[in-house]
Image (cartoon, helix red, strand yellow):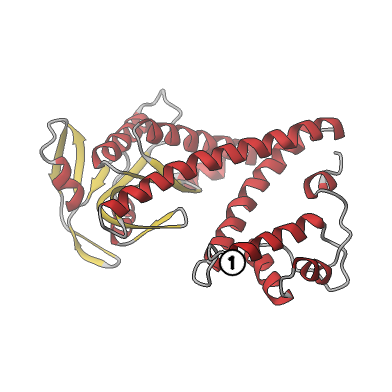
Amino acid sequence: MVDLEPLLLGGAPHLTRIEVAERSGVPIALAEELWRLLGFPRTADEDVAFTDADVDALRQARELMELGVLGPDSQAALVRTWGRSYARLAEWQASLLADVAPDEDLARALLPRVESLQSYAWRRHLASAIGRTAATDTDGGAGSVLGVCFVDIVGYTARSKRLDERELVGWLEHFESEATGLVVDLGGRIIKTIGDEVLFVADRVGAAAEAALLMTERGEDPDDPFPEVRVGLAHGPVVSRLGDVFGPTVNIAARLTSVARPGTVLVDRGAHDELVEDPAYLLRGVRRTPVKGYARLQPFVLRRA
């Protein structure tokens, strides 16, 4: 496989970390902290591992700080999130490139297109996120009221032991792809996938309920390769930060998932109160379940009418 490092970094490495810090006007201590938060490996003073692109990146980071965009309270969290997100994306793309094994001409044609598509996707998602943030600010709250849903594969550990690496990856990718499609089609948003689990949110709890029921129904169909799942759904205030969601509503959804039976959707009181008047659904209370942090959590089983 062709050496892509010069193409990706804008040239062969020819600078040390000390030289990069000096040329960018960023103190070496701050530069090292930013690189650490991004997840880059530490280099020695004499290691020639950087290019002019690293100088430009540090200079731009300094300018964002001077503009007040990267403040002390947000710098570490934002840069760390960048590092985690792009590290995962890069690992996946590296495996794709390994399969393609591009020569230098193909790589020169491929990389700008990948970069352009990434920029396009980021701008579209940023536009949507800004719109949601503006709507939240108009409502006068720091957080949002959302339907929060965890979807967990039943029997994942046993199934994973029977599959080789390629089969396991294919199985999980099918689950994530199908779950994402169902959620997005109903107006929800995937927050993250964690191996055998998907976390998503929806502005309307009815949309989250519909996605949850569709997934359990598909999991129960013996002719559908979608895996059997259990689901926990809660509705209430949620704190959004750096693409993730936090708060008691998220915790309750996770706890409901942990006690849900295979093929079942459990909802909390908040989701129950939103859905109980909808003729499309039936809700049945089950015994209060003591779970970590919630001694008397009241679940309801959600089914179609």
Q: Residues within 10 Å of mark 1 (few under 14, many from 20)?
A: some
Considering the image in quadrants, where does the C terminus appear? top left
> Residue at the spot x=74%, y=37% of the render?
111
Relative to 283, 17 lies left or right = right
Residue positioned 86% across, 57% down in the render: 13
Q: Quadrant of residue 209?
A: top left
Image quadrant where residue 106 sits: top right
The secondary element bearing badge 1 is classed as helix
Q: Give the residue drawn at x 15%, y 54%.
A: 287
Give whichever of 102, 128 is nearer the camera: 128
Is residue 152 visible to the viewer in this orientation of the structure? Answer: no
- Asked whether residue 135 appears in the rendered view, the answer is yes
To which residue does mark 1 refer? 65
Which residue is at the front of the view, 242 or 279?
242
Residue 242 horizontal/vertical position (percent)? 47, 57
Q: Residue furthest front?
A: 67
107 left or right, relative to 296:
right
Judged left or right of residue 5, residue 280 is left
Quarter of the figure that contains the N terminus: top right
Amino acid type, mark 1: Met
**Dividing the picture into quarters, in which one does residue 241 lie?**
bottom left
Q: Nearer the viewer, residue 148 or 105?
A: 105
Vertical relation: 65 (above or below) 152: below
